[in-house]
Amino acid sequence: MLPIRHGETVQHVRWVRDDRNAHGRLTPVFADPQDIENTGVDVPQATEPRDGTSNRQIVDLVLFLPAGTRVNSRDQFIVRGDTYEVEGEAPALSNFFTGTPFLTEVKVKKVTG
């Protein structure tokens, strides 16, 4: 599978474990961000409430990572300077006829407000 020729560089922030903070609550621990080049970034889809009182905005993206990239559901991605959470599962898949790996498709979401 060829890389995306005009893709972007995004940063993959892997979830490592949960630690307890001073109040006994679990808090995630992440590894240092790692660059992933030649990533396809879909057009963002933004939604926001129309009630006039809420300031919440949700932005959804789909990332197309190099074939075979492994992603945990608790990982994060930094895209164009904004941090996005992985939504759902993103398994590395191969074509069941040829064994050729597909690009890893990852749905990510950013919620503000």
Image (tube, rainbow, N blue to C red):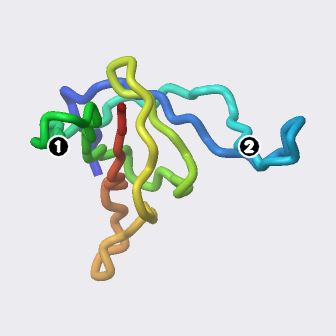
Extreme left residue here?
50
Q: Nearer the viewer, mark 1 or mark 2?
A: 1
Percent coordinates x, y for residue 100 in the rendering: 34, 65
Mark 2 crowd level (few <14, some 14–19, many ≥20, 10 Å Cα): few
Check disc 2 and report its element: helix, strand or loop: strand
Q: Viewer-proximal residue, 46 or 64? A: 46
- Give the numbered dot on residue 27: 2
- In this picture, residue 36 sits left or right of residue 80: right
Q: Viewer-proximal residue, 10 or 109? A: 109
Percent coordinates x, y for residue 104 in the rendering: 36, 55
- Give the numbered dot on residue 77: none
Task: Give above or below for 24 relative to 39.
Answer: below
Mark 1 crowd level (few <14, some 14–19, many ≥20, 10 Å Cα): few
Task: Give above or below for 81 relative to 87.
Answer: above
- Residue in the image at 19% along x and 26% along y: 6
Percent coordinates x, y for residue 108 in the rendering: 36, 46
Q: Quadrant of residue 7?
A: top left
- Give the numbered dot on residue 49: 1
- Residue in the image at 26% along x and 31% along y: 55
- Residue in the image at 57% along x and 52% along y: 74
Task: Give above or below for 25 relative to 32.
Answer: below
Q: Quadrant of the C terminus?
A: top left
- Residue in the image at 38% along x and 24% along y: 82
Check disc 1 and report its element: helix, strand or loop: loop
The amino acid marked with disc number 2 is Thr
- In this picture, residue 95 sits left or right of residue 48: right
Task: Give above or below for 87 relative to 111.
Answer: below
Percent coordinates x, y for residue 29 in the rendering: 73, 39
